[in-house]
Image: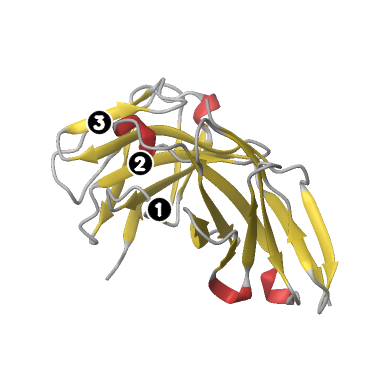
């Protein structure tokens, strides 16, 4: 079974500093990895994905994520945090295709990012 | 494009009542799914569908029913509401392309008393 761990419930960072939100995964085979962001009282919004290829993936709003196969990690990063980045961030994994049930996307429990002015 | 539309936004039920949460998408997505979000639990998959007439169970299907008669609509039925079903429910859809990201609705906040 596939799983995702986000080891930090909350991350605090000063505005202008770099930020990292951590994610590790467990899946059989090559993973499909996603990051989503959730603002208060809203649904999740897609940020970026890793399917194959370059280990550094760039996404929306200046975010990027680094895939590390040996450490089974997919950490979300941004060089300079903004107050408006404050939100709940979710990492998600999908196993390699093996039938209709493979479409299931398994989410981590989320990390609350607070950017302090 | 409206995207994924969920109704109602809020609902309060008494234990034992039934209701249907509506979900509609206008992006011609084949894949649709229902998740529930609970504090500290992340999102858990309830049911999903890969096309009209095809549905299957996710991680937490008990107490919920779904059907998919059209590509656009994927309603979630609570058969006999229980306090444990108090949660925020999200509908999400995507193309059946395996690397397509999910598009989420804005959620339905359900309270069962």
For residue A63, side relative to residue B109 (left or right): right
Mark 2 on the same chain as mark 3: yes
Above or below: residue B103 compared with residue B36: below
Residue positioned 81% across, 77% down in the render: A15
Above or below: residue B103 compared with residue B17: below
Q: Secondary structure at mark 2?
A: strand
Chain under callout 1: B
Chain under callout 2: B
- Residue A9 location in percent, x, y? 76, 46
Chain under callout 3: B
Which residue is identified by label 1? B102
Q: Mark 1 or mark 3, which is nearer the start of the sequence?
A: 3
- Where, by quadrant of the figure, is residue B83 drawn? top right
Residue positioned 50% across, 40% down in the render: A30
Which residue is identified by label 2? B33
For residue A65, side relative to residue B8 (left or right): right
Q: Secondary structure at mark 1?
A: loop
Which residue is identified by label 3? B55
If the image is split into quadrants, where does the C terminus of chain A sit? bottom right
- Residue A106 location in percent, x, y? 51, 38
For residue B70, side relative to residue A5 (left or right): left
Q: Mark 3 or mark 2, which is nearer the start of the sequence?
A: 2
Cβ atoms at labels 1 and 2 below 8 Å apart: yes
Q: Mark 2 or mark 1, which is nearer the start of the sequence?
A: 2
**Mark 1 or 2, closer to the camera:** 1
Cβ atoms at labels 3 and 1 below 8 Å apart: no
Q: CA distance from mark 3 to mark 1?
A: 17 Å
Q: Nearer the viewer, residue B108 or B30?
A: B30
Residue positioned 51% across, 42% down in the render: A31
């Amino acid at each position: 079974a596939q799983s995702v761990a986000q080891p930090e419930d909350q991350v605090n960072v000063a505005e202008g500093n770099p930020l990292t939100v951590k994610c590790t995964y467990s899946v059989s085979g090559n993973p499909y990895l996603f990051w989503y962001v959730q603002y208060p009282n809203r649904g999740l919004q897609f940020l970026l994905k890793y399917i194959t290829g370059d280990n550094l993936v760039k996404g929306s709003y200046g975010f990027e994520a680094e895939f590390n196969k040996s450490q089974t990690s997919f950490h979300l990063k941004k060089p300079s945090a903004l107050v408006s980045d404050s939100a709940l961030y979710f990492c998600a994994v999908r196993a390699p295709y093996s039938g209709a049930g493979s479409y299931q996307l398994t989410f981590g429990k989320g990390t609350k990012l607070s950017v302090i002015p | 494009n409206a995207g994924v539309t969920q109704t109602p936004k809020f609902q309060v039920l008494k234990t034992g009542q039934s209701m249907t949460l509506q979900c509609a998408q206008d992006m011609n997505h084949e894949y649709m799914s229902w998740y529930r979000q609970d504090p500290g639990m992340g999102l858990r998959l309830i049911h999903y569908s890969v096309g009209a007439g095809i549905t299957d169970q996710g991680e937490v299907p008990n107490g919920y029913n779904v059907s998919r008669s059209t590509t656009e609509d994927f309603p979630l039925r609570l058969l006999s509401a229980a306090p444990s079903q108090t949660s925020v429910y999200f509908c999400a859809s995507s193309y059946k392309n395996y690397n397509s990201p999910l598009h989420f609705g804005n959620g339905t906040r359900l309270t069962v008393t």
